[in-house]
Amino acid sequence: MRFTLGWLKEHLATEADAAAVADALTRIGLEVEDVSNPAEKLRPFVIARVLTAAPHPQADKLQVLSVDAGSGPLQVVCGAPNARAGLVGIFGPPGAYVPGSDMTLKVAAIRGVESHGMMCSVRELQLGEEHDGIVELPADAPVGLGYAQWAGLDDPLFDIAITPNRQDCMGVRGIARDLAAFGLGTLKPLHQVHHMNSLDPVPGDDPAPDVRTDDADGCPAFYAQAVSGVSNGASPDWMARRLKAIGQKPISMLVDITNFVSIDLGRPLHVYDRAKLSGALVARRATDGEQVLALNGRTYALDASMTVIADDVAVHDIGGIMGGEQSGVSETTTEVLIECAYFDPDHIALTGQKLGLTSDARQRFERGVDPAFLDDGLAIATRLVLDHCGGRPSAVTRAGKPPLARRTLAYDPGRCLALAGLDVPADRQKAILERLGFVVSDDFTVTVPSWRRDIDGQADLVEEVIRIEGLDKVPATPLPRAEGVARPTATAEQKLERRVRRAAAARGFAEAVTWSFLSEKEAAPFGGGHWTLANPISEDLKVMRPSLIPGLARAAQRNRDRGESNVRLFEVGRRYLADAERPTLAVLIAGDASPRDWRTGKARAADAFDAKAEALAILAAAGAPV
């Protein structure tokens, strides 16, 4: 999850700098992977005006410019076709490092004329891909001022890791809420954030769009609103700047609105070109073999376990993951339908795994978006479309019902000390939970907010209190130690495992650790898998292993593929049979059993008797009657 300090401060009233924010994020359990400031690499570059431009005496395609960067004229040689007197651009002085060209500027003679720096292009400053000329700024841009400061690029960028249980922090709003609960500032009311003038549903006189959901499990709720007569141009500067700052390329106003709301509020949306739809738009299960050309340019084959959005003719959307190319908006779009739906997290995860398809929408839906934010999310998106694209709204269609059942937990504040070892006063715990959005009654009956799908019991509430109070405050308490000489604690089974592991290693085997999961095909020769995962990582890791041999065989094959002629591996692990788990030691010999003989030039291949000898030796070390 990436965001800038300026974006965060749209939601959080705080004077904290980047260092304080990063420290607070780490303290509350949101791991900061990186903090950077794009302005640092642009610090030497300033706004400059070209005073004069004359042909280079020795080169037809070069010009000799006189440039004012705030401290008098400088001579600069430039090859840009748009360089001319009066142009205001970006100047790099000698000593500045140009990131896009990977070079440091210095005073140098170019075809016999001395140049004191350079006028820069967009690509040279890594601000975009354009490289057909130098940057042209407005004529009133202040000469001599740092470009990064003038362009608002001096905005630290945060990259944080979001664990799967923190779906609420997949939007800047949720991160701001956590920081406010920590005490770093005050969470602004949502309607006071600058790009949201109201959260009320947008009224419309046009007929409501014809949408419905026929898949209550995969898509319980499908809300939609249409807007007619829109003009899909470029995004306003503030939105484009926010998206570019986190590495997203602005595409068009309609597309950028969906991306912005998804990142800002953790609410994925999709916009369809209504002119490309035929009939009602329906959330339903796909049929086996149906295909869709997605917005990434790839065609995906679907099956009946997957939720899709389709009209009377074709599938237009892999529900909650990616829209289709056929109904995507373009610069000629004038009629749009805005989709704001709730998709079941488990269905999204399974579909994404089967298709090998990931997206920003999938990352949010499979964690679980706020089911109570459909009306607000749709209203915010519709107002942004009306504000920036114009048009005439329709009435709203609300098909299906999102899962809005209120969840309550009976909480004992004493559990905080018992589970976490930190004594936090009950009123302090109540205040922390309330700042996080929980409703806490006097008897500590806690109502869980709709955006916290991960809260399931008292231990989860203790975790919330502790992380906001500060994990660093939990005292380090040593375990009690009995007096006298400590007695051995290893069990007979552990001692046996150590003996056989040492015996295998002593006989020249290298220990391997392989997956406990196999594909059904690999398990079949060993009687098949008795335990199948409900939510496997992939089809190749679907069943619990009935044998250790397939994993060792794969490891041996990788070694043989890389030229190793003598592979000797062992593994200590468990097999998962129908009746029990079986602790097992497996050995594998592949290739040669002995080095190549110097006289014959040949090596003896390993055979069953080599394996038998090793098995007997390790069994003997275990104390078996060999």
Image: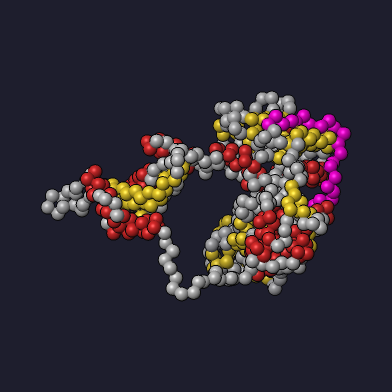
- Stretch of the chain drawn in magenta: 194-215
The residue shown at (71%, 36%) is 220
Left or right of 61 in this view: 199: right
Left or right of 220 in this view: 495: left
Q: Where is residue 212 in the image (x, y as percent from the top left)?
A: 74, 30
Q: Quadrant of residue 185?
A: bottom right
Q: Where is residue 355 in the image (x, y as percent from the top left)?
A: 55, 38
Secondary structure, magenta segment, majority class: loop
Is 124 part of what is drawn in magenta? no
Q: Where is residue 456 in the image (x, y as percent from the top left)?
A: 67, 50
* 187 vs 16: above or below: above
Q: How many marks?
A: 0
- Is residue 617 among what the camera can see? yes
Residue farthest toward the left in the current orientation of the protein:
599
The residue shown at (12%, 52%) is 599
Q: In which quarter of the image is residue 94?
A: bottom right
* 600 vs 338: above or below: below
- Is residue 235 among what the camera can see? no
Is 196 part of what is drawn in magenta? yes
Image quadrant for the N terminus? bottom right
**What colouring style does the render use?**
secondary structure
Left or right of 156 in this view: 338: right
The residue shown at (76%, 33%) is 399
The residue shown at (73%, 56%) is 411
Q: Which of 555 and 226 is in front in this view?
A: 555
Q: Position of residue 4 (x, y in %)?
A: 69, 59
Q: Which of 76 and 251 is in front in this view?
A: 251
